Each structure stands twice: as C-alpha cells, then as structure tokens.
Amino acid sequence: MTVHSAADGGSDRGGDKRARILGAAERVFARRGFFAARVSEIAKDAGVADGTIYLYFKSKDDLLISLFEIRMKQVNDVLRAAIASPPGGATATASPINQLRAFIKAYLKLVHDEPAAAEVLTIELRQSSKFMKEYENPQFADFLRMLGGLIAAGQERGELDATIPAHVAARMIFGMLDELALAWVLAKQPLPTAATSEAAISAKAPGTRPKKFDIVRAADWVVALVMTGLDRSKKEKSP
Amino acid sequence: MTVHSAADGGSDRGGDKRARILGAAERVFARRGFFAARVSEIAKDAGVADGTIYLYFKSKDDLLISLFEIRMKQVNDVLRAAIASPPGGATATASPINQLRAFIKAYLKLVHDEPAAAEVLTIELRQSSKFMKEYENPQFADFLRMLGGLIAAGQERGELDATIPAHVAARMIFGMLDELALAWVLAKQPLPTAATSEAAISAKAPGTRPKKFDIVRAADWVVALVMTGLDRSKKEKSP
Amino acid sequence: MTVHSAADGGSDRGGDKRARILGAAERVFARRGFFAARVSEIAKDAGVADGTIYLYFKSKDDLLISLFEIRMKQVNDVLRAAIASPPGGATATASPINQLRAFIKAYLKLVHDEPAAAEVLTIELRQSSKFMKEYENPQFADFLRMLGGLIAAGQERGELDATIPAHVAARMIFGMLDELALAWVLAKQPLPTAATSEAAISAKAPGTRPKKFDIVRAADWVVALVMTGLDRSKKEKSP
Amino acid sequence: MTVHSAADGGSDRGGDKRARILGAAERVFARRGFFAARVSEIAKDAGVADGTIYLYFKSKDDLLISLFEIRMKQVNDVLRAAIASPPGGATATASPINQLRAFIKAYLKLVHDEPAAAEVLTIELRQSSKFMKEYENPQFADFLRMLGGLIAAGQERGELDATIPAHVAARMIFGMLDELALAWVLAKQPLPTAATSEAAISAKAPGTRPKKFDIVRAADWVVALVMTGLDRSKKEKSP
DNA sequence: GATGAATGAGGCTTCATTCAT
DNA sequence: GATGAATGAAGCCTCATTCAT
C-alpha cells in the first residue's frame, strides 16, 4: 500500500505526480523530521522540480497536513473495516469487546505494514505547534470517536467497566498504541546517517532504545492489559 | 517548584542567570514550541542579553536537552520518593502494586502542578527527530527502568500478570500517562493568539480538543484500567 | 477604440489572439503594475493559454514595449490629425498657436476616453528603468518632435516666445500633460483591493489623492498657462 | 549633502550603518531600478551583511519608502527655506510671485546638486504600484500644498491668474519640474553597463535622450513659461 | 497553431551564533 | 561576566519561460 492506495499497475509514471510527491514527502519527513526536511530534497526524491511541488500543494505545511489526512483516513478506513467484519467471517455483528480487540490488532498491524506512515502519524504530527495546537484534525477526531464509541457501547451493554468515561478510556488506549508504535519505529533504525550535528549524542544508553520487538504480537499484550488488567493478586479470593 | 528547585539558597540574585534562562526557555518553548521559539525571545523573557545564553548553554538544542534532563530528573526524584514512602506513612516497604498506584498518581499530580514542565516533557520532547532519534536520554531510561522494575517485581511476586514483558507494560503505561497529560495540556489553552497563518484551520471540530478534565482524578481511572482492565463480561464471578 | 484599432476587418474571430492578448495585458498592467502583473493572469484575462502569449510576443518585456508602441502610435496619429484639421473644418492651414491648442486638448481628451491606455503611458512606462533607460522609444521621440516642431514653427513666426528652446518647452508641456493625466488616473480608483500588505499605510492624507476633476476641461487651464502664464501683476502697467 | 544630512565629519565610520545603507540603497536603486535592485547588492555597497539591513528596515519596500520620505523631507525643507528668505537677503516678506520663482529655482538646483536623490524622486518612486497606488505620501502632499499655497496666495492678491485652480496649477508646475528633472537625469548616464538583457534595444534613436542641458539655467525657462506663457502674438499691446 | 504542466534559477528574509566592547 | 549589534548561511517559494502533446 503506497500513499496513493488505489489500483496502481506498478507504472509510477504518468499523472501521478501528486502521489509521487506525497510518497517522497513521507520518506523525507520520516528520515529528517518535518523541520529538518528540505523541500528540495523532497522534490529530488520525487523526481520532480522544486516548483512542481507547489502545483500540487500550497506550502510545505500543506504537504504535511495533506499527508497526515490521507494517512489517517486510511487508518480509519482499515479500522472501520476491521471492526465491521468479525474475524471468523461470521455474519453476526461483532460484540463491542471483540470489536475492541479487532481495533487494537488492526492498528498495530498497520504500523507494522506501513512503517513510513507510522512515523508520520507518531512523530511528524507532533513536530509543529501548528499541528499540535492550531490544527484541529478531523481525522484524528474520527479515530477517537470510533474508539470511544466502541467502549461506550460495551459500557452500555454492561460488558465494559463504566467507571471510566469512554472518551478518557479511548485516549488511554490510544496512548498505549501510540507509544508502542513509537518505540517500535524508533527501535527500527540503526541510524546510518552519520550524525553531522555536533549536538548529536553518541553514547547510546542501552535501555532507552528498546530491543526490537514483535509489534503484531504486542497487540495481544495490549488486549490483555486493556481487558483484564495486570492485577493477579486477588486470585486467593476463589476458595 | 521552579526550574532551579533545590540547592538554591533562596538567593534569586547573582548567579541565578542559568536558572532564569531555563525558566524562560520552558515558558517560551511551551508557548511557541521548540522550533518556533526564538533564542532572542527566551533572552528577553529571562531578562538577559541574547549572547548571555551562550555563556551557560552550548546551543539552543543544548538548552532544550538541559531543560529536559533537569525536569525529567525532578520527575524521577518525585516518583522515587512516591514509591519509597507508603502513603499511610507506614514504615513497611510498600508492595509493588501499591508502588505502581503511587507512581501513577504522583506522575499525574506532577503534570497538574507543573503544567509548563509537562508541556516540555510531553510536547517539546517529540518536536524534533533530533531528540527523538539522535538523543538517547538517560533520565527517560531511568523513568522506564523504574516503572519496569516495579512491574517486574510484582510479576516475580505473582501479584502482576507475567505474560506481558515488564518493559513493554511500562511503555504502555507511560503511553497512557503521556497521552492523558498531552490531552490535558492542550485542552488548557483557549488559543488567544489569533491565528494569523492562513494555514490555520478555522473549523474547530468539537471532540478533538477535549473539555478540560480533572487530571488528578484521572489517576484513578488509569489505576483501574491498569489493574483490573475494562472487561466485566465474565459474570461467572457471581456464584 | 480597442487596442487593435484600425486595419481590423471587424472579424473578432480567429487570428485576433494577438489583439486579445494586448488588451488583456493593458488591463492587467493597469490593474497591477508591470512588475506585479503575472503573465498567467494576462493569459487568463485574454482567454488563451500561457504559452500562447509566447507565440505572439518574445517576452513579458516585449509585451509592454509592443503595447506602448501601439498606443503611442495611436496617440501620435490622433494628435497629428488634430493639428492637421482646424477645428472649424476650415481648409486653411492652422496657425502653430491653434495647433498647440488642438494638440493639448486632443491629448487630454484621449486620456479621458482611454483611461487604460493612459495608465500604460503614464505609469507603466516609468515602472522599469529597463524601459526608461535601456529602451529608446521612437514613438515617444515622434511625440516630442511633433510638439517641439509646433513650438519651433510658432517661434519662427514670432508668435511664440523664442527664449525657451523649443525642445525644452515641449518637454515642459509634456510634463504638465503627463502629470495631469497621472493625477486624474490615480484619482479614479477607490482602491477596492483591500490592501493586504502590512506596508500599506492606512492614513489617507487628504490632498495627495486629488478629488476627481474634469480632465477635458483642464485642457483650457493648460492652454491658459502655456499661452499667457500666471502673472497678472503687470496689468496696471498699461495706462 | 549625503543622505544623512546632518554634520558628518567625513568619518563614514561608526554607528552610521543606517545612513550607509540608505546611501547604498539610493545608489543601487538609481543604478538598477527598484525591482531589479538586489538587497544583497545594497548590502555589499553599504559594506554590511545582508541581514544587517533588516536591523534597520522592515523590508526592501520599507527601504524605498524610508529613502523617499527622507529625501522628500529634505526637499521640502530646502524649498521652505528658499521661499522664506528673499534672495537679496532683504527682511521683507517675499511676494508670492518671488516665492514661486525661488521655489522653482531651488527645486531644479537641488536636482542638479543631488542627482541620486533626483533619480529616486523622479524614477524609483513610480516603480511600484505599491507606491503609486497604495502608499499615500505625506511628504509629497506637503510639497503640493506648499506650491499650491504659494499660488493661492498670489491669486488672492490678484497677482496671479485665478482662473486655474491653485492645486491644479501646482500639479502642472510640478509636472514641468519633474519632467525636466527626468530628462536631465536620464540624459546623464552614457549607459556604461553593457546591456546584458537581449531585450535591450541597441539602436539609440537620437532625439529621445536629449543632449545634456543646464538644468539650473532651465529654471529661468520654467519661470518664464509659468509667468508669462509662450504667446507673443498679441502685438496689439505695443502702440 | 494551441496548450498548460513542468521547470529551476534566484530573491527576500530569518535567526542561531559570534565577538568586540 | 555581560552585552547586543552584526553576521551570513540557507530555505521557501515565485513565476517567466519552455516543450511534449
């Protein structure tokens, strides 16, 4: 799945300039970070002239916002599909709990399958106060609404603990997923870019950059934590 | 608790320039974001000349790193104290579970008491891949080690679920705390700065920027989720 | 009188692209100024593609020069006709003085009838030292020669003061006409373009932008000044 | 009189950066025209770094506006002085007619003494629609008011023809002065800059660029035209 | 002839950092 | 130590012009 999703017969030629630019932007943003990314580098990576970028996007900011919206929409689409169709292919509508499980698994699978997108969503998005503070993202609101709706439904059925407000629970779950995604994404790169900045700290304290782990499998851990929690101390209750 | 906290004999005179600069940097970073923050604005806010900053810090980057390390160290100190002393003042060593509860509550209380610091820790830290990717933060490693150690201890005692690796669980919990802190910090500002940039999106989708909530109380929710999870469907509990 | 005036068999179809482009250029130059005018805006205004302009003109510069030459030639034609035919339709050759009067009146009437052309001639022409300094304009030379010739003829006949060199007097009269035209052209626009630039000064000092006046009537004032001057103090001399 | 007027002991060193920049801007604007002038060339000519210019001026536009205002103010000061003190040093207040004469002579002498300033005032000012259309210049309004006031005073005394509105007469006189200044300024340069632009027309039609003339002496011609006009045909005066 | 998407050189401006005082 | 005026590298973006269709 490249950034331009749709059926792409491999021919990256033609009028797909916009998609090429988005793809290049995603790579360069992931490589350098939004602020350190140079428009000229994106252009070169996309194989177009600098000015061409401005035929498709209003500004560098617009490029990031567009990228984010496209990606977040894809995420939402995938998640919506995941919670709509029960894994077993059963036709019965899935229960909120099963939907929640599917949601978590689908999200982390997406991170695994689209690491570049994951970088944009977990890192770049936070790069600019413009996006953090000024830019209200409808796609992200959708994401939270979907997750919160699942939880609220479960609470109404009495299947999920209702003491935690659904939208807060949604935030917490998103935080878990996001942090796992971030840790996994950062663990990936061995930083081949010989850090030019003298500010770069060379001593890599072990422990911060976690050993690479299986993010897809981590979904089970998230489900476990979210569903049953960590506490096993009350087992003595049972006679 | 100002940025220069301890070991500051009250003399806010003389060599406190370093502390004044750090305080100003924290405010300006929180106000503008790291990249949009201007060194000259920090200098003015601190009441020193631009050049003076370079007598105490190697660069703007160094300023952020120093700020982060000081704050994170304070956080770690507070958390260490919180898990060391049982809330009741009892001398007995607290159980891992109680320590975990204390840890979570102390963290969110800190966010509440020091919002400027919270901004630096939750937002600025992620603003630059320079810091995300190149800078290995020993204080953050300590934070994770402390949290992970608590969980590992609980797992060894059989009080906490051992199927989730301790360091992964620590990440998940940190993600929850961090996301709540972020939501709370961002909910705060009513954005009085009349967004001049045309890129600013005017339609403020309700729901993205959450209504202000009680972050201290939210600690109970985090504890609830972490300890017992959300699932209440196993009604076999009842006899 | 549109820009393509004569020799245009009415067929506004087909090869009139050149004329359409010139007309659009005149409007856009008048609206924006030469430097701020965009070739693409001219193209859109003319209803042709950007590239089409380059089928008819070498460059944007060439467009301005062509426009100026065409307009200036028209002006010269009108002026030549005006000084050739005595106003009363008499066949007798007009005297230089009457020709001078006719010249002045015809010029200002032209400004009144073709304000877009007047803008090009009074404003755009001076917008670029490229045109002021590098481009020697034969049409303008003709204009000055015509006016200077009139004056010289009058001087030879003893009807006009000969102390002022004819070509200098021509310059002075052109200056008067040009300045009046400029003042009149600028007085016209109520500046509907909500000045976005912060450089725009808001305080509109009354007096600079003159109230709109009757430029055709102003011809009489020019004639009066040129012919008899302002001085009325020596009238008491005569017994 | 350099751009920074005041007592300048020749030492172009010290804190006079602002003045050096203004002087350089005047030269470069005169040499290239406002639009073709490069900020970097101004900086080099002033012997400062590019960025230094922005310590003293908000933008390139601001530089031109500042330059114009300073120069125009100097012009107004000189003219005010000229019409205040009768040439003979007599203490009696000069008559409007004499003031008008003094005004005209002082203006053209100024053009002669400060050709760079004259270029800015006659050419650059008109380079941008920003200045022509958006920017209302209070100094130029003062100039016109001064000249118009002189004429109105003469008209009230009955010494000057009252059929021409004073402010229109002022415009006409300014037009004459401005056109003469322009012709003189343009006549000066032998265009040593081997025109690089292919658009440059090489054939220099003689006649357009007038032979250099004595602009100070030309003041007498302007006075003659303004006072008595050109018409000498009414010989009925004599007998 | 006509099109208009693409080009790419180059300008204005910002701002972290330096260094003479 | 402290200052803050000066520096100058470098980026985003514009827009006249070209050329494959």
Image (cartoon, coloured by chain):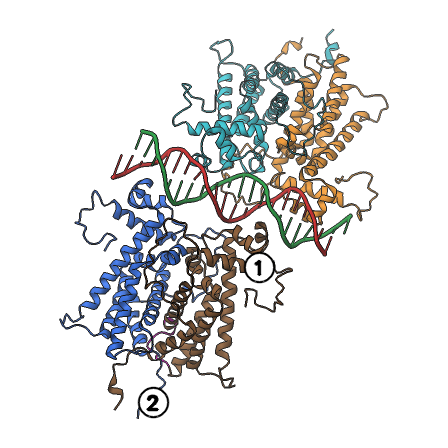
Chain colours: A cyan, B orange, C blue, D brown, E red, F green
- Name the residue tied to disc 2: C236
Report, in whole angstroms, how far the alpha carbon at label 1 lies from the one at label 2. 55 Å
| Closer to us: C176 or A237 | C176
Q: Tag 2's secondary structure? A: helix
Reply above or below: B44 against D228: above
Residue C163: where, in percent of width, then height? 33, 78
Q: Tell which residue pokes out farthest to the left in this image.
A: C91
Reply above or below: C186 against B55: below
- Name the residue tied to disc 1: D20
Q: How many marks?
A: 2
Most prominent secondary structure in the magenta stretch?
loop
Instruction: Say if residue A66 shows up in the picture.
Output: no
Which range of residues does the magenta coloring cover?
D160-168
Of circles 1 and 2, the one toward us is 1
Of the residues shown, which amino acid type is indicated by label 2? Glu
Assess whether residue C169 is covered by the magenta stretch: no
Residue B140: where, in percent of width, then height? 71, 27
Of the residues shown, which amino acid type is indicated by label 1? Arg
- Badge 2 density bin: few <14, some 14–19, many ≥20, Cα 10 Å: few
Residue A179 falls in image quadrant: top right
Reply above or below: A85 against A21: above
Instruction: Say if residue D170 shows up in the picture.
Output: yes
